[in-house]
Amino acid sequence: MKKVLFLGVLLALLTACGSDDDDPVPALSVSTGEVTLEAGDVETTIDVKANSTWNVSSAATDWCTVSPASGTNDGQFTIKVTANPDMQDRSTTVTVKSPTLEKVITVKQDPASLESLLEGKWILDKQTSPEPAFDVMVGITLELNSDKSAVAVIDRYVTPELHIGTLEGTWSISGQTLTLSSTIMDIPTNITFEIGQVSADTFQSSMKISIPGLLPADGLPVIINREK
């Protein structure tokens, strides 16, 4: 009887040990803990090594998304970011969680360049000098294309004798200065904007033109907004 009891206890111990050996040690790892992405619409792939289910979430879903949002065992997911609309870098985190473990990935995105911010169509909404005579400039539109061609629709009498219609030419950026190069009455002309505060939808600037007498020598302060 004692022998049978001993064998029973021994068998139970062996079974328990065997059960412990069969339980895998939780594992979760990712291919990197930090990614730095360019300013545009870009994406990158992250490798996951795990022996269980896992979920992924972003702390800034308005500009950084993940797909797929879950997986089982080894797999991959993609981090996608939208174009950065500001001239400042930005960052967030993406978290990968299994039932017992967690990994955090820092996602950084480069700032937008002034050149990329300015591409598109703009309208001069306001001049802020104390001279109401320059209100005639309000409503001028600018089209800055990715191939560096430019169209400025002025369609104004800037003096009683001088009417300026549509100017076609090129645009360029040097530092904080936007330059539109065209011709007025066959005269090579540059319209420049010394840009101060700027965002994806608006910029403040001092506007100058290379033809003397049309604008103040030190520039006309203007507010230019992206055309809706």
Image (cartoon, grey):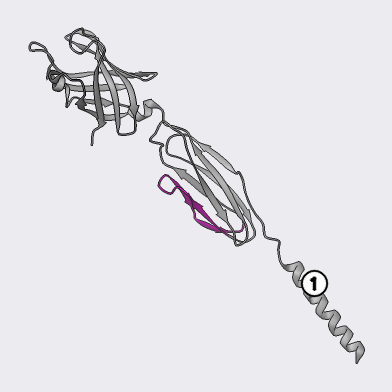
Residue extending farthest left: 160
Could you tell me which residue is drawn at 51 percent across and 38 percent down?
Answer: 108
Q: Position of residue 71 (x, y in %)?
A: 55, 58
Q: Classify 53 as above or below 29.
A: below
Q: Is residue 59 magenta?
A: yes
Q: Nearer the viewer, residue 187 or 131?
A: 131
Q: Position of residue 145 (x, y in %)?
A: 30, 26
Which quarter of the picture shows residue 226? top left
Which quarter of the picture shows residue 11? bottom right
Q: Is residue 160 left or right of residue 85?
A: left
Q: Say which residue label 1 marks.
A: 17
Q: Nearer the viewer, residue 127 or 65?
A: 127
What's the magenta region?
54-74
State the quadrant of the C terminus.
top left
Which quarter of the picture shows residue 192? top left
Can residue 147 be seen here? no
Q: Is residue 133 left or right of residue 49?
A: left
Can residue 107 be seen here? yes
Q: Nearer the viewer, residue 206 or 102?
A: 206
